[in-house]
Image (tube, rainbow, N blue to C red):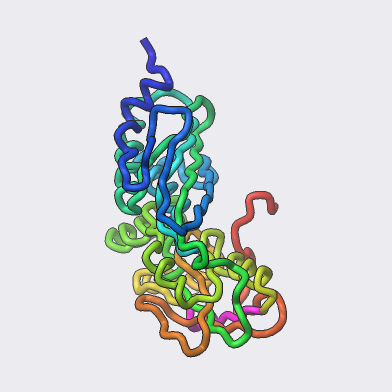
């Protein structure tokens, strides 16, 4: 006899709903959460479709982990603390071996961000998943895209372009040695949501966004929301040594500016505010509109509907 939807939920997802905020988890028509007193609820959803957001060759554990981190990165950009996850999973068939790997990756990601899985939906169709993340911040203390001011510094966490290079390795477009391949592909399939940094930036950053579609594309969102112009100096972009040794400088800069999938935080700081560890200044906020950079790739970022 084939598995039912409820068999799959019980076998692969029940038990992942334990957390301090959970009053009612998986098994009822909705979950019930208790937020810290004086906090706001932040909600964001992120959909991943096979062949669009991840390669068909990606392991189910990596599909789950990457999808959760991509969604959690939106909470990091708001300075929010994760409280819970919801998962809507569409499967072509009830493949128990695939689901065992997927459940393992989901449990790893859930533990990494400290958020329980409290519900969702399972249905049949082409492989895709939507992860909804719920987080909280103090009611008067959270980050947005709209507070950048002329005179602020434009800063970014981590290194850029590694994930795009990792995708090129996985798709056979970039040949590198085993060590470089491991580093770059891990940056693509196992990104880290910068949650601790986002929470630390609540006290000092004037605007923030996570880099999912590419630095130039996401910087344009801050510029538009804040009514300012962002000036980016490509010479200041943080590139890993592995990326520098795996591709020429022009390709590395193009991936850093437009590759996407970095899930680092792009933020603005007042001029006299110390730069957090692991971050670099790579531009300035000035009066005006839009973005400017001394280097402009052919494609400035990912857009699902742009031809």
Give percent across and percent down for residue 8. 37, 24
Q: Is residue 241 visible?
A: yes
Tell me the quadrant of the picture where the N terminus can be found.
top left
Q: Which residue is at the front of the view, 270 or 42? A: 42
Residue projecting furthest to the left? 179
- Where on the picture, by quarter, is residue 94? top left
Q: Is residue 284 left or right of residue 237?
A: right
User: In the figure, 55 relative to 206: above or below?
Assistant: above
User: In the figure, 254 relative to 46: above or below?
Assistant: below
Residue projecting furthest to the bottom? 272
User: In the figure, 171 relative to 150: above or below?
Assistant: above
Residue projecting furthest to the right? 288
Q: Which residues are magenta?
A: 229-237
Give percent across and percent down for residue 290. 69, 74
Q: Is residue 119 left or right of residue 267?
A: left
Give percent across and percent down for residue 228. 67, 78
The residue shown at (40%, 62%) is 195
Q: Is residue 248 visible?
A: no
| In the image, residue 234 lies in the stretch drawn in magenta | yes
Q: Which residue is at the front of the view, 140 or 265? A: 140
Q: Is residue 21 left or right of residue 126?
A: left
The residue shown at (39%, 78%) is 276
Q: Which residue is at the front of the view, 271 or 191? A: 271
Q: Is residue 126 left or right of residue 276?
A: right
The residue shown at (52%, 62%) is 259
């Amino acid at each position: 006899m084939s598995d039912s939807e409820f068999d799959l939920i019980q076998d692969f997802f029940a038990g992942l709903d334990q957390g301090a905020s959970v009053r009612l988890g998986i098994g009822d028509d909705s979950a019930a959460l208790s937020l810290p007193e004086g906090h706001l609820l932040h909600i964001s959803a992120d959909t991943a479709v096979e062949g669009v957001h991840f390669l068909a060759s990606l392991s189910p554990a990596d599909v789950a982990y990457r999808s959760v981190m991509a969604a959690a990165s939106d909470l990091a950009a708001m300075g929010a603390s994760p409280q819970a996850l919801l998962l809507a999973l569409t499967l072509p068939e009830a493949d128990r071996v695939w689901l065992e790997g997927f459940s393992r990756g989901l449990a790893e990601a859930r533990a990494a961000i400290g958020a329980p899985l409290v519900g969702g939906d399972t249905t049949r169709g082409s492989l895709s998943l939507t992860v909804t993340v719920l987080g909280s911040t103090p009611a008067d203390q959270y980050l947005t895209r709209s507070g950048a001011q002329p005179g602020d510094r434009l800063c970014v966490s981590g290194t850029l372009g590694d994930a795009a290079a990792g995708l090129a390795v996985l798709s056979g477009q970039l040949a590198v040695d085993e060590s470089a391949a491991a580093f770059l592909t891990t940056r693509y399939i196992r990104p880290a949501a910068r949650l601790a940094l986002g929470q630390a930036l609540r006290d000092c950053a004037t605007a923030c966004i996570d880099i999912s579609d590419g630095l130039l594309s996401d910087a344009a969102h801050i510029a538009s929301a804040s009514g300012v112009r962002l000036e980016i100096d490509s010479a200041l972009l943080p590139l890993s040594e592995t990326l520098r040794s795996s591709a020429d400088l022009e390709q590395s800069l193009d991936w850093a500016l437009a590759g996407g999938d970095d899930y680092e935080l792009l933020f603005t700081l007042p001029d006299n505010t110390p730069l957090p560890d692991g971050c670099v200044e790579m531009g300035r906020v000035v009066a005006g509109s839009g973005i400017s950079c001394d280097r402009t790739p052919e494609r400035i970022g990912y857009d699902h509907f742009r031809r």
